[in-house]
């Protein structure tokens, strides 16, 4: 069996301290081995419409693709795995739906959403995102951000106008340069990663990483690595304790320390030697 066949997955969302409505949507689907998070924006409750449409569409599209063994995505122009290609296509389908909805419904005009998704398969995962919702990985005691924010501030950091430390204090840190639902087509960053035993993957809205430093995120995940549900709740509690200025949502995925396949192989070897 593959390394990602026995994942532990949890998702949790909170309105935060200062907001009246939760415009985030987050979901984990164990059969699909999918974690997806969207942070909506625009209009009275329209942001939550955009994020919910996005998450539900991605789940629906990937369920259909998986049922067809990803046959439509075996060959693709991007040179991606079929799973990564299907994930990108699902996000494009979400963008089209959100765009049509906000154009055709006055109460939804101007709505949009970020999205970050991780689709696990075999011994790795496909990563896709648009906007400033993030994917982190904890491996061997280190926290690494696997996505790059699509924000004006990130562009200024890359051009040398800000250091990352200065950027945390900027009033413009949440101005996204990409989002679903704004245009008929959207640029989606897609790449593939190899998983390792005991990896922990964190998807989060900016309501988390704006409120607590990466070092505290790492310490929290290490402290509660044996209980993902507790880890997710602690991350949200700490974000709210620091002000909770936005909705805060997290999804956590843990790769088992020893996969079922490895356990099965070790059992067979042990039985061969000792029985």
Image: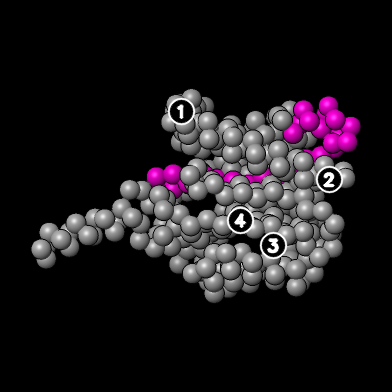
Q: Image quadrant of residue 181? A: top right
Mark 2 in CB contact with mark 4 (< 8 angstroms) = no
Q: Secondary structure at mark 4?
A: strand
On the image, the x and y values in percent for residue 275 come to: 10, 63
Name the residue that disc number 3 marks.
209
In the depicted view, which residue is nearer to us: 2 or 14? Answer: 14
On the image, the x and y values in percent for residue 87 come to: 56, 37
Q: Is residue 101 above or below residue 121?
A: above
In the depicted view, which residue is nearer to us: 125 or 174? Answer: 125
Magenta span contains residue 109: yes
Name the residue that disc number 4 marks.
11
The answer to whether 228 appears left or right of 134 in the picture is: left
Residue at image coords 75%, 40%? 50
Cα separation, mark 3 vs mark 4, equals 16 Å
User: Viewer-nearest of labels 1 and 3?
Assistant: 1
Q: Which residues are magenta?
A: 98-127
Residue at image coords 61%, 64%? 232
Question: Which is more N-terminal, label 4 or label 2?
Answer: 4
């Amino acid at each position: 069996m593959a390394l990602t066949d026995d994942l532990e997955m949890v998702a949790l969302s909170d309105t935060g301290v200062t907001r009246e409505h939760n415009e985030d949507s987050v979901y984990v689907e164990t059969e699909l081995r999918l974690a997806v998070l969207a942070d909506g924006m625009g209009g009275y409750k329209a942001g939550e419409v955009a994020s919910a449409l996005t998450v539900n569409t991605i789940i629906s599209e990937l369920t259909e693709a998986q049922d067809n063994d990803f046959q439509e995505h075996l060959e693709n122009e991007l040179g991606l795995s079929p799973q990564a290609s299907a994930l990108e296509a699902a996000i494009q389908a979400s963008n089209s739906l959100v765009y049509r909805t906000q154009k055709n419904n006055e109460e939804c005009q101007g709505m949009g959403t970020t999205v970050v998704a991780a689709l696990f398969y075999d011994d790795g995962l496909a990563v896709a995102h648009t906007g400033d919702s993030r994917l982190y990985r904890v491996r061997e005691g280190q926290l690494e951000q696997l996505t790059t924010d699509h924000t004006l501030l990130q562009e200024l950091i890359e051009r040398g106008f800000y250091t990352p430390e200065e950027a945390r204090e900027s009033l413009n840190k949440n101005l996204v340069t990409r989002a679903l639902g704004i245009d008929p087509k959207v640029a989606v960053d897609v790449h593939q990663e190899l998983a390792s035993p005991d990896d922990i993957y964190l998807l989060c809205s900016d309501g988390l990483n704006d409120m607590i430093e990466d070092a505290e995120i790492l310490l929290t995940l290490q402290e509660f690595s044996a209980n993902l549900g507790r880890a997710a709740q602690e991350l949200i509690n700490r974000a709210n304790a620091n002000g909770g200025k936005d909705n805060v949502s997290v999804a956590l995925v843990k790769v088992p320390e020893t996969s079922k396949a490895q356990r099965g192989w070790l059992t067979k070897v042990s039985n061969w030697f000792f029985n």
